Amino acid sequence: MAKCKFADAFKEEREKSGIGKMDDQGDPVVMLLNHKDVRKAAHNYKVFSSEAVPGRIVVPSEVNIRTTRQIPFEVDPPMHKEYRSLLEAWFKRPLQNTYKEKLTTIISTVLDDVLSKDKVDVVSDLALVIQSRALTLLLNVPFDKSVKWISWGTHVFRSEGEALDGDKAAILYNYIDEEIDNAIANPTDNLYSTLLAAEVNGKKLTKEEVKGVLILTFAGGRDTVINALTNMMSYFSANKKALDYIRSKPEIIKTAVEEFIRYFSPLTHMGRVVTEDTTVCEHAVKADSRISLCWASANRDEKVFENPDEVILERKVNPHVGFGFSHHNCLGATHARQIMRITLKLLAEKVSDITVLEAEENIENLGEFTRKVGYNSLKATFKKR
Ligand code: HEM
């Protein structure tokens, strides 16, 4: 298959030193670039902790705009396991047939709408709409809640490489506060009510804990899914035969989706706080400093992946870390995978061609590196089959 332009920003440094360095609002971050080192550090929560001041493991840091701890993301074992056990079953609901059927209807409707227009912006008219409407299923809330989420636009909690905007973040935090209060007043069977009724270690979850889960569910599943969907569309514009190929071999949809997640790595990296003086790749790191696990670099590691810069739709062995690794691996991955798989299936059935007309790339500035993670806007035409 032809190459698509999502360059590996980290290749040179990964091969030379295995680490990269960046500054985040005056707080330096040492980025781990090798697949092996990323997996090892992700596993070693005692030295590379997720449980720092809320917001600090996120890069760019959210410490100035958030006091609520995101759960289970900013909690280390053993407490992490307690929260995960509580959430696991809920986040596996996307495997149910009724969920898949509803998701198929949502995605099919969006694609039909896109096909009825001369030109669309893939980011705002397709990816944001699918992501928001699909989230109503994951939260088990009425479909029309998505109208407000879509109206927030794609930039609502987006960092654009800079420190996050507190006013924008407050839109989400206030919204979640209101929804929690609604669920307290009128309990139902949505995620808010389910969490409010749940217990961890014999104690009911507090409002603050419920808010911590919801912030993560809204924010963690937004840009990641939007980037994954948009980048997949740009790939089909650059590789004209790929959609026909997938239509002729639908059995490769699962491996194709894993390959897109590896290749695009919608979440570039995630931080950890070092708990004791140690070394990474022979580089000293001090207690209370930050490292990051660079999923995007690990996913192009030539020691692990053959022809890492090529999209190989049928790649057989694909131990990518696009959804993370070890304890904190992505809780939303089942939902995200279903969105990607169903979109790909319907795209192959319904669409004969995607042509990008104008692209505004979303470039992350990471100290010595710049990386394309997706698009701010991607104007394209979609042709019916
Ligand atoms: C964790 C990527 C979609 C919720 C993670 C992590 C990665 C990741 C790399 C690990 C973070 C770490 O180790 O610190 C992605 C990608 C997605 C995606 C690439 C889409 C293509 C979603 C969605 C949701 C979600 C749709 C929910 C709506 C979470 C949660 C965690 C997480 C709750 C934390 C799990 C824990 O700490 O135990 N994700 N994510 N993600 N993600 Fe996702």
Image: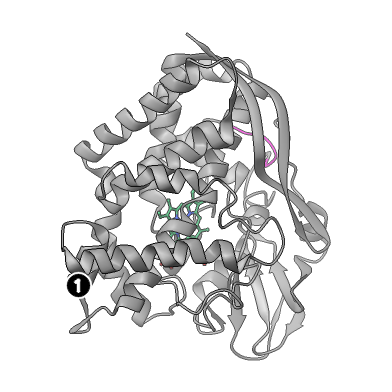
Secondary structure mostly seen in the magenta stretch = loop
The image quadrant of residue 98 is top left
The vertical placement of 82 against 310, above or below, is below
| Vertical order, 352 against 137 (above or below) | above
> Could you tell me which residue is drawn at 70 percent across and 62 percent down?
33
Question: What residue do we see at 24% from left, 40% from top?
Answer: 99
Q: In this view, does 192 lie to the left or right of 59?
A: left
Q: Residue furthest top?
A: 385
Viewer-side residue, 183 vs 115: 183
Evaluate whether residue 248 shows in this view: no
- Residue occupying the point 54% across, 55% down: 321
Under mark 1, the amino acid is Ala
Q: Indicate yes or no whether the magenta region holds residue 294.
A: no
Above or below, 215 against 339 in this view is below
Query: How far from the left and from the top, in percent, is residue 27?
Result: 73, 79
Whole-percent x, y for residue 383 in the image: 54, 12
In this orientation, does residue 145 appear? Answer: yes
The span shown in magenta is 308-312
Circle 1 SS class: loop
Quadrant placement of the N terminus: top right
Q: For mark 1, what is the residue? A: 198
- Say left or right for 382 vs 203: right
Left/right of residue 232 with respect to residue 307 in the rendered view: left
Q: Could you say which is closer to the camera, residue 112 or residue 81?
A: 112
Q: Residue 208 in the image: state x and y as whole percent.
A: 35, 78
Asked if residue 28 lies left or right of residue 331, the reply is right
Residue 187, quarter of the rendered image: bottom left
Q: Position of residue 80 (x, y in %)?
A: 37, 76
Is 119 above or below relative to 336?
A: above
Query: Residue 369 lies in what quarter of the image?
Result: bottom right
Tag 1: Cα neighbours inside 10 Å, few (<14), some, or many (≥20)? some
